[in-house]
Amino acid sequence: MIQRIPTPEKMKEIVSALKCERRSIGLVPTMGYFHEGHLSLMRRSSAENDATIVSLFVNPTQFGANEDLEKYPRDLDRDTKLAEEAGADYLFTPTNEMMYPEGYKTYVKVVDWSGFLCGVSRPIHFRGVTTVCCKLFNICMPDRAYFGLKDAQQYLIIDKMVRDLNMNVEIIPMQTVREADGLAMSSRNVYLTDEERKAAPLIQKGLTKALKMYENGETDAKKVKAAISDTIAESQLFKLDYLEAVSKETLCPVEGILPGTLIAVAAYLGKARLIDNIIL
Ligand code: PAF
């Protein structure tokens, strides 16, 4: 039976006991409103570790002033049941006041990388993500932590933070889980109207075209990006935020595509901002 752990103090007590018993810990950091993507991370953690902690915290420091912090979908009872079915042992649900008490002053930032791609339109986002993940790693002391590759930049930044700061956790990326029509699963997909939902898979359609072009020998990033933006433009509902081909090692734009190049897209569709990517 899954246990809901409401405070960092209680979570640390449980972690200390697990460590004394030399049991391995897997952590799945989330903001809740689970879909199959989250559940696949939990199942993998449960298969690879003695204990799986799922943190559920809608982290205010990663939302900009005009973003969807208040509206972010929440359903704790449904999430508790789904996490239990996926094999999680603990659901850690701290409040904002517990994570950022009055007078809180400390932030962790991976410089440069936090300002590229999503960081252009969301300048404080990755500082919030790395800060909360650092706090979660300190509280939960996981042997492994699991992240979905839909947020490829997030995964690369967290992995970089862990390497740069010599943290004792292995960061495990997992493939994006998609709806039957190719749309990457996201808690924010609930913001889409029926008409927007029908248009949404065009992003994945564009990325698939890019993959085919690359497999057929095309390495000119400009041509590949043009094919993606033309596909997305098949619906006028999209407003492109960015479309970039970057090196996975530096997050800097590349002109020639090489194995391992990351093509990342963000586009507004009504109230939702959708992101997706492909690693070639
Ligand atoms: O990907 C998310 O849901 C969040 O950015 C994370 C990693 C849980 C940090 O709040």
Image: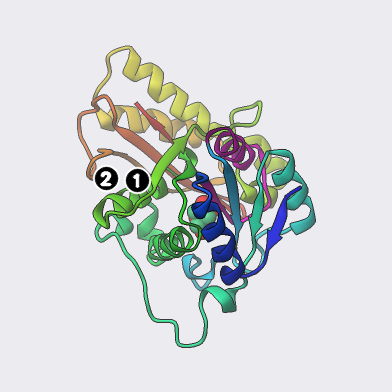
Q: Amino acid at mark 1?
A: Leu
Q: Is residue 84 left or right of residue 239?
A: right
Whether the magenta-drawn stretch holds residue 141 is answered as no
Place of residue 81 in the rendered image (x, y in percent of width and height, measured from the top left): 77, 47
Is residue 231 visible in the rendered structure shown here? yes
Left or right position of 222 against 12:
left
Please name the residue shown 69% across and 49% down the image. Answer: 190
Q: Nearer the viewer, residue 260 or 43?
A: 43
Q: Which residues are magenta?
A: 26-48
Mark 1 and mark 2: span between their CA atoms?
9 Å
Residue 113 x, y percent position in the rendering: 28, 54
Assign the C terminus to one quadrant of the image.
top left
Query: SS for tag 2?
Result: loop
Q: Residue furthest bottom?
A: 103
Mark 2, residue position: 251
Element under disc 1:
helix
Given the image, on which type of amino acid does mark 2 rest? Leu
User: Does the CB distance between marks 1 and 2 fall below 8 Å?
Assistant: yes
Image check: 156 left or right of 23? left
Residue at image location 41% in from the left, 61% down from the top? 134
Task: Determine the image quadrant of residue 244.
Answer: top left
Instruction: Give the labeled residue for mark 1.
Output: 156
- Judging depth in this view, the residue of 208 and 237 nearest the camera is 208
> N-terminal of the two: label 1 or label 2?
1
Q: Position of residue 27 (x, y in %)?
A: 52, 49
Ligand 1 within 8 A of label 2's CB?
Answer: no
Q: Is residue 29 magenta?
A: yes
Q: Report the label total.
A: 2
Q: Is residue 73 above or below residue 208?
A: below
Crowding near pointer 1: few (<14 within 10 Å), some, many (20+)? many
